[in-house]
Amino acid sequence: MADCINKIEAFVGNISFEKFVKDDKTASAVVRKLEIIGEAAKNVPEHIRQKYKNIPWKDMARMRDKIIHFYFGIDYEIVWKVIKKRLPKIKQQIKNALKACNA
């Protein structure tokens, strides 16, 4: 998950929302990484989810489900808000959890 978040950050860099939605390659790559994050969140063992309740496991899984099952188009405004507002916090939470597990 941390690797996917790092890649999303690298993909979008400092581009604007307008450039993001016009760049199909970048938007598609970001959406794919969000799918992978959501799938990974679904497969985190329950005891880990319980130990790190501050990480929004269910929200990540739901985002994946919305992307996968949204056949008529993706709302890139929601995707943008997730990558700009939610992912930085999630990244730090995952980083802290990994650090605690490896300590």
Image (cartoon, rainbow, N blue to C red):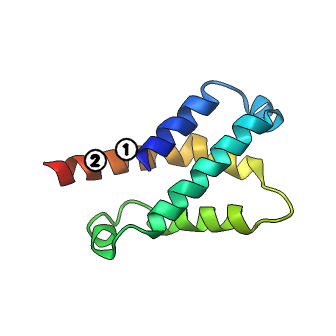
> Residue at image x 63%, y 24%?
14
Q: Mark 2 Cα within 10 Å, few/some/many (few <14, many 20+)?
A: few
- The residue singled out by tag 2 in the image is 96
Give the residue drawn at x 17%, y 49%: 102
Give the residue type that dot 1 points to: Gln
User: Pointer 1: residues within 10 angstroms few (<14), some, or many (20+)?
Assistant: few
Residue 92 seen in this snapshot: yes
Residue at 74% across / 47% down in the picture? Answer: 77
Number of on-image labels = 2
Say whether marks 2 and 1 touch (CB < 8 Å). yes
The one nearer the camera, 41 or 78, is 41
Q: Can you give x and y, in whole percent of width and height, for residue 86 in the image?
A: 53, 48
Disc 1 is placed on an element classified as helix
The residue under label 1 is 92
Could you give the CA–CA distance between mark 2 and mark 1, rounded to whole angstroms?
6 Å
Residue 92 in the image: x percent, y percent? 37, 44
**Residue 70's x, y, as percent?**
77, 65
Quarter of the view holding residue 49:
bottom left
Task: Kindly tell me whether residue 88 is visible in this rendering.
Answer: no
Tell me if residue 37 comes above or below residue 85 in the rendering: below
Q: Position of residue 93 (x, y in %)?
A: 35, 50
Q: Is residue 88 above or below residue 78?
A: above
Image point (43%, 69%), residue name = 43
Q: Residue furthest top?
A: 14
**Furthest residue in direction right, as rendered:** 72
Give, as a three-letter code, the residue at label 2. Answer: Asn
